[in-house]
Image (spheres, rainbow, N blue to C red):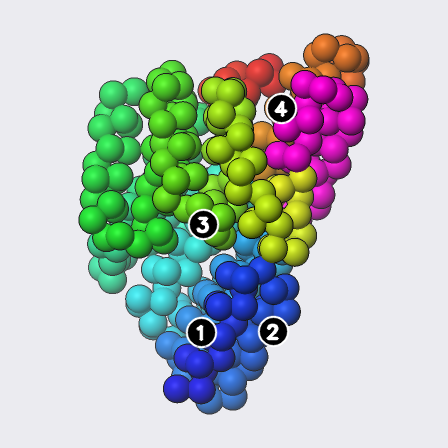
């Protein structure tokens, strides 16, 4: 009971944007380790890693999730193992280590302990990666629609937003920009100024910016600034920069590069790459040599993705 209370308090504080909330999740992990409760220990690793991913980035989150998975496998905690594999699949998707992400996803889906609740999120990661690498096609679009249709009745943002995120990736890669933008808009509408928007941020921003609808996120920035943590600060800074892009390209370019490098330093290479793609477009009108340097940097961050289709769509090749 004590652990549940501490965790609930930490979740509430995190949602309010309090960076000190992370200590509640660390405390839950310490208490769980002292009690040597296998399920609670693995769940505590899962929850701590999730907060670290959203607030502090992947370099903080991945070791916590990996240790949780090791314990889940050692102690045969099947349910926890699948949730932790899902978390690591999401982690490695965000770092751009997509072969590692697929390895975690495939292992989770192959497990006899697999949960139908997780299937949509797991399949979404797999779909997004293969679409970004190969371009997808009608079968990919049909699968994305299925994941969305099955997630929406759950009325749980932890299922709905990953499904929408997968759909926007797939439809962008198959060339249906209009449908991809539609799902970006649905993410903003359903997530609002919550952590769930931060978790699907960069492609949502890229799409809405291309569609001339960035003000839909701009309207949420005042509330989102409550997340005074390294990753949210850099994500929000990227939109601040895009919003001044037309009036002051030089200033916008500098801010975008700073935000991208901050995110790369946190291991968030997909976030950083998408932001650099926007920076390169601005640089095209200012300094072609700088634009080429930015594209080279973005391609370097994307090496582990092996996503030729994505790089072409982003204008990086």
Pointer 3 residue? 196
First in residue order: circle 3 vs circle 2: 2
In the image, the segment drawn in magenta is 238-267
The label on residue 23 is 2
Q: Is residue 149 above or below residue 280?
A: below
Residue visible at 77% across and 12% down in the picture:
286
Measure how far apart labels 3 and 1 are at the Cα level.
17 Å
First in residue order: circle 3 vs circle 1: 1
Measure how far apart labels 2 and 4 are at the Cα level.
35 Å
Residue visible at 40% across and 32% down in the picture:
185
Residue visible at 32% across and 50% down in the picture:
159
Q: Are marks 3 and 2 in contact (CB under 8 Å)?
A: no
Q: Are marks 4 and 1 in contact (CB under 8 Å)?
A: no
Q: Secondary structure at mark 3?
A: helix
Residue 3 x, y percent position in the rendering: 45, 82
Q: Nearer the viewer, residue 64 or 274?
A: 274
The label on residue 278 is 4
Q: Secondary structure at mark 4?
A: helix
First in residue order: circle 4 vs circle 1: 1
Measure how far apart labels 4 and 3 are at the Cα level.
22 Å
Measure how far apart labels 4 and 1 are at the Cα level.
38 Å
Neighbor class of circle 4 (other Cα within 10 Å; few <14, some 14-19, many 20+) is: many
Residue 96, picture quadrant = top right
Q: Tell me the chief SS of the magenta region.
A: helix
The label on residue 8 is 1
Residue 276 x, y percent position in the rendering: 65, 28
Q: Secondary structure at mark 1?
A: helix
Q: Secondary structure at mark 2?
A: helix
């Amino acid at each position: 009971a004590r652990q549940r209370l501490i965790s609930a308090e930490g979740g509430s504080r995190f949602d309010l944007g309090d960076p000190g909330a992370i200590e509640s999740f660390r405390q839950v992990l310490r208490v769980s380790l002292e009690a040597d409760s296998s399920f609670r220990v693995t769940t505590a690793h899962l929850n701590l890693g999730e907060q670290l991913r959203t607030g502090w980035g992947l370099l903080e989150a991945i070791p916590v999730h990996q240790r949780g998975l090791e314990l889940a496998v050692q102690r045969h905690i099947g349910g926890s193992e699948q949730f932790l594999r899902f978390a690591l699949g999401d982690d490695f998707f965000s770092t751009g280590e997509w072969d590692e992400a697929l390895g975690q996803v495939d292992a989770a889906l192959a497990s006899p302990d697999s949960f139908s609740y997780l299937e949509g999120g797991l399949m979404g990661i797999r779909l997004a990666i293969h679409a970004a690498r190969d371009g997808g096609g009608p079968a990919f679009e049909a699968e994305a629609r299925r994941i969305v249709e099955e997630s929406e009745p759950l009325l749980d943002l932890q299922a709905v937003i990953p499904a929408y995120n997968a759909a926007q990736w797939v439809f962008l890669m198959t060339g249906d920009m209009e449908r991809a933008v539609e799902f970006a808009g649905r993410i903003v509408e359903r997530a609002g100024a919550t952590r769930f928007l931060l978790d699907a941020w960069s492609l949502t921003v890229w799409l809405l910016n291309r569609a001339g609808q960035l003000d839909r996120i701009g309207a949420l920035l005042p509330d989102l600034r409550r997340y005074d943590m390294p990753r949210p600060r850099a994500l929000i800074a990227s939109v601040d920069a895009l919003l001044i892009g037309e009036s002051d390209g030089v200033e916008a370019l500098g801010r975008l590069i700073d935000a991208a490098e901050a995110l790369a330093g946190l291991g968030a290479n997909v976030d950083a790459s998408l932001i650099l793609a926007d920076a390169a477009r601005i640089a095209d009108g200012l300094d072609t040599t700088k634009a080429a340097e930015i594209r080279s940097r973005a391609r370097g961050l994307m090496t582990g993705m092996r996503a030729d289709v994505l790089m072409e769509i982003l204008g990086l090749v």
